[in-house]
Image (tube, grey):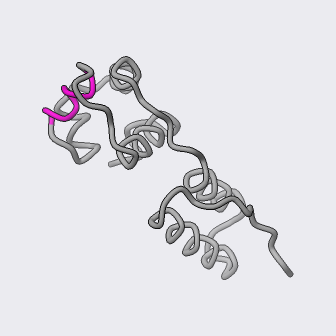
Amino acid sequence: MTIKRETRAAKSGAMASILSAAQGLHQSGVIDKATMRDYEALCLTPVPDYTSADVVRLRNKTKVSQNLFARRLNVSPSTVHQWESGQKRPSKLAAKLLSVVEKHGIAVLD
């Protein structure tokens, strides 16, 4: 049986590797179709551009302090403060992680 996959390119080399591994697991029957769709959405969806207000909104939605938010994202509390104050913007990798938190909640990072 041939499995039709999306032909869009992954947004980065790391995402392409993750998607390739997931496709292999799917073909082996280790992960189901729904999980494969989640991997495709994660790897193929454009990375959102988070503003300082977006980061504040997301952190408030998760009901955690800057310190705990930083710890879960594996960044320093100073970085979260700089994102929220507009001094810096999240990198593409951090923005991708923020989008995962926005979609699935902070508990997904535990």
The answer to which quarter of the image holds residue 8 is bottom right
Whether residue 42 is situated above or below residue 95 in the rendered picture:
below
The answer to which quarter of the image holds residue 37 is bottom right
Q: Quadrant of the N terminus?
A: bottom right
Q: Residue at x 46, y 33 (%)?
A: 49
Whether residue 72 is situated above or below residue 63 in the rendered picture:
below
The percent coordinates of residue 70 (x first, y second) are 22, 38
Q: Is residue 83 magenta?
A: yes
Q: Nearer the viewer, residue 23 or 45?
A: 45
- The reply, left or right, for residue 31 in relation to residue 105 is right
- The reply, left or right, for residue 7 in relation to residue 70 is right
Q: Residue at x 50, y 62 (%)?
A: 15
Q: Residue at x 35, y 25 (%)?
A: 55
- The reply, left or right, for residue 30 in relation to residue 56 is right
The percent coordinates of residue 30 (x first, y second) are 62, 75
The percent coordinates of residue 7 (x first, y second) are 73, 63
Q: Nearer the viewer, residue 92 or 43?
A: 92
Q: Residue at x 56, y 56 (%)?
A: 43
Q: State which region is magenta.
A: 77-84
Q: Is residue 3 magenta?
A: no
